[in-house]
Image: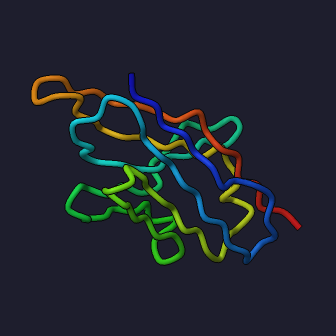
Amino acid sequence: QVQLVESGGGLVQPGGSLRLSCAASGSIFRINVMGWYRQAPGKQRELVATITGGGSTNYADSVEGRFTISRDNARNTVYLQMNSLKPEDTAAYYCNADISKSSRARGNYWGQGTQVTVSS
C-alpha cells in the first residue's frame, strides 16, 4: 500500500503565503514525478506544478513566479510554497505521485486533498 498525506492548507488573506506538504509512505521503491493539482468548485482539476526526481520543475502559467515546488527525497515529501496568494487560488489542492513499488510495479497515486481559501 502507498499513501500520500497532505497538510498545510487553511485560510489566508490575499497577498499572504502558505506552505503545503505531502508525505508518501508505504511500499516504495522509487518516487518518480511528484506534483500538485487543484480543483475549484465547479471547475476541472488542473495542474499546478510538478517536479521530477532530479529536480526539474514545471508550473502552470497562473502560478509561475508565485509558487515554488520542491521535494525532499530522503523524506519522500513534496512541498508547495505559495506566495502572493490571490482569491482565484482558492481550491482543494491535491498531491500526486508516480511511484514504483518495485522495478516492475508502478502506479499513480493521489492524496486526499487539502483546502486552501484566500479571502479577506
76 relative to 120, above or below:
above
Which quadrant is home to the N terminus? top left
Task: Tell me residue 91's x, y (percent).
Answer: 67, 48
Residue at left offset 57%, top offset 45%:
6
Farthest residue in the right direction?
120
Residue at left offset 81%, top offset 70%:
13
Compare residues 94 and 85 and report the one nearer the observer. Answer: 94
Dividing the picture into quadrants, the one containing residue 51 is: bottom left
Farthest residue in the left direction?
103
Q: How is the image coloured?
A: rainbow
11 relative to 13, above or below:
above
Task: Tell me residue 114's x, y (percent).
Answer: 65, 44
Compare residues 5 and 66 and report the one nearer the observer. Answer: 5
Dividing the picture into quadrants, the one containing residue 72 is: bottom left
Residue at left offset 73%, top offset 77%:
15
Q: Is residue 87 left or right of residue 84?
A: right
Residue at left offset 65%, top offset 77%:
84
Count how many numbered circles sit on residues in the image.
0
16 relative to 45, above or below:
below
Compare residues 106 and 103 and report the one nearer the observer. Answer: 103
Which quadrant is home to the C terminus? bottom right
